[in-house]
Amino acid sequence: MDTLEKLAQKNKAHQKQQSNDRFSTVAMILVLVPFLFGIAIDVGAINSSLNFNLWLYGFGALCFGLLLAAMGDLMLFSRWLKISGLIISQGWFIYFWAFQMQSWLAFVPLVPAFVLLQIQMPKIKKQAEREKNGI
């Protein structure tokens, strides 16, 4: 029976790792969604401003998406709340960055994300210390 219990623990750990990998993949795909809109605008599938520059748009999308994903990864919310927030923030970014050409307004969701991160920072540090100590 001891062997079966060890095998069950290994299976549970493996399933958790697979779940983490799937979540990371979904999050990264969502981070890269603005690039799809940029390419669609660049090839003419979606109408936007005449001043659209794919390189500038791509750089902005990368800066926004990776910063938001990094802050979201540290936050102490459930996975689905993080994904929902990422979808809403990416939609906001795409609308204001690609279609309205208002870069200052496109990056606004980073401010509340940063504020939430700062509010949760003491709890995040405590959790990191507990994980470091193996508790």
Image (tube, rainbow, N blue to C red):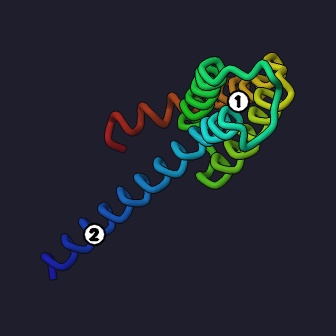
Tell me, yes or no, whether the two marked residues, 1 and 2, touch with CB atoms within 8 Å: no
- Which residue shows up at 64% across the image and 55% down it? 80
| SS category of the residue bearing label 1 | helix
In the rendered image, the quadrant that contains the C terminus is top left
From the viewer's perspective, tell me whether residue 92 is left or right of residue 16.
Answer: right
Question: On the image, which quarter does residue 88 sit in?
Answer: top right
Question: On the image, which quarter does residue 43 sit in?
Answer: top right
The residue at which mark 2 appears reads as 11
From the viewer's perspective, tell me whether residue 113 is left or right of residue 78.
Answer: right
- Which residue shows up at 13% across the image and 76% down it? 3
- Which residue shows up at 67% across the image and 42% down it? 86
Query: Does residue 71 appear in this view?
Result: yes
The front one of 104 and 70 is 104
Q: Which mark is residue 113?
A: 1
Q: Amino acid at mark 1?
A: Ala
Q: Amino acid at mark 2?
A: Asn
* x and y, in percent, of residue 90 in the image: 71, 38
